[in-house]
Image (tube, helix red, strand yellow):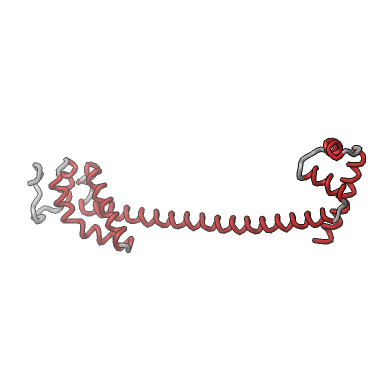
Amino acid sequence: MIDGVDVPEDGGDRVDHIADLLVAVAGGSREAFARLYDMLSPRVLGLIVRVLVDRAQSEEVLQDVFLEIWQSASSFAPNKGQGRSWVLTIAHRRAVDRVRSSQSSHDRDERAGYREWATGSEDVAEQVERRLDAQRVADALGTLSEPQREALTLAYYGGYSQSEIAALVGAPLGTVKTRMRDGMTRMRRELEVQA
């Protein structure tokens, strides 16, 4: 007898002594829980190992299973099934959950790794393309006259308007516009040749 519940030491002639232990555990009996653990942990661990294969993970899941049993023994209904089946169902569900969780984690890591790899490759390709474009533009700028190069550099790299450029270089606005137009035409030809 454990905490007022008749539980045979060896199982006796009772059909479901595990159910009796679960009822005692539901009542808060640590002694019943210890007996339940001693009786079922090898079988529960065996089931979990068959599902997970990994012994260390299986031992972690075993702890989770018995923690769940301790916390939810009151939900066991002796009139609806065998105690051993209830415990093994919890163990199987926990083991399958661990497999799914591990698989999901692996899949997430794999997707993240692929995204990083794909993004990293694109970034490198984009950087190379930008550097090549910048080099071609610099080469094309080098073919312009100094006034054309100055006007375009101030406009595109400095962000100045044509009026501001005219004031900065001390040239009439019409002259700046002509320099920029002629410079762009020449650069377009140079970039087409380079492409």
Residue lying at 18% horizontally and 47% vertically, measured from the top left: 22
Residue 49 horizontal side relative to residue 103, left or right? left
In the displayed structure, 95 sits above or below 20; it is: below
Work out whether residue 105 or residue 11 is closer to the camera in this orientation and state it.
105
Residue lying at 76% horizontally and 45% vertically, measured from the top left: 157
In the displayed structure, 69 sits above or below 125; it is: above
Residue lying at 58% horizontally and 58% vertically, measured from the top left: 118
In the displayed structure, 14 sits above or below 46; it is: above
Residue lying at 47% horizontally and 54% vertically, measured from the top left: 108
The number of numbered discs placed on residues in the rendered structure image is 0
Residue 8 horizontal side relative to residue 56, left or right? left
Q: Position of residue 45 (x, y in %)?
A: 25, 59
Quarter of the image where the C terminus is located: bottom right
Residue 178 horizontal side relative to residue 62, left or right? right
Q: Position of residue 51 (x, y in %)?
A: 32, 61
Q: Position of residue 15 (x, y in %)?
A: 14, 53
